[in-house]
Amino acid sequence: MIAGAYLGLFLAAFGAATLLPLQSEALLVGLLLSGKYGLWALLAVATLGNVLGSLVNWWLGRGIERFHRRRWFPVSPRHLEKARAHYQRYGHWSLLLSWLPIIGDPLTLVAGVMREPLGRFLLIVTLAKGARYAVLALVTLGWVG
C-alpha cells in the first residue's frame, strides 16, 4: 500500500507536468497529513515525477515544428507564440517559473523548441519544481503542527 501511494504521487506529478490537467499538490498534502510517509521520500518522488514530465515537454518541443498545426495538438498557436516570445525575452531564467500553473508547462515545451541545453534545463526545472514542493510541505506541516 505504501509503494502504491508513492507510485500514485509519482504518476500525478508526472502527469501534472505534462499538458494534462492533473494536480499533484493535493495528493502530496494528503500524504503529508496522513503522517504515514517520509517527508524527504515524498518530496523526492514528487519532484522526480514532475521533472520527468517536464522533460517529456522539452522533448516534444524539440520536434514540435512538424506537429503544432495539427488539430489534436494541445497548445494553441497563439499560446505557443506567446510563450516563445516570453522565452526569447527572458531566456533560460524563465524556467524558474516552470512550477506555475498554466504557463509553466508551455514554458518547458518552448524550452525544447528553443533548443535549451538539456543539462541547464534539468538543473533549473529541478530547482524550481523541488522548491515549490518543499514550500508546500513546509506550509502544510507548519499549519498542522
Image: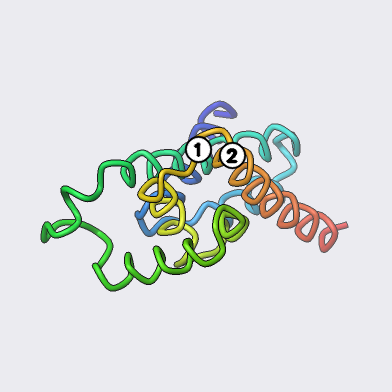
Callout 1 amino acid = Pro
Residue 79: quarter of image: bottom left
- Residue, disc 2: 120
Q: Position of residue 99 (x, y in %)?
A: 57, 57
Q: Residue at x 75, y 42 (%)?
A: 35
SS for callout 2: helix
Q: Residue at x 22, y 50 (%)?
A: 65
Residue extending furthest left? 71
Q: Position of residue 70 (x, y in %)?
A: 11, 57
- Residue, disc 1: 117
Q: Position of residue 61 (x, y in %)?
A: 33, 47
What label sits on residue 24 in the rendered view?
none
Determine the CA span between mark 1 and mark 2.
Answer: 6 Å
- The quadrant the C terminus occupies is bottom right
**57 with respect to 31 (left or right):** left
Q: Position of residue 103 (x, y in %)?
A: 47, 66
Residue extending furthest front? 89
Residue 84: quarter of image: bottom left
Residue 19: quarter of image: bottom left
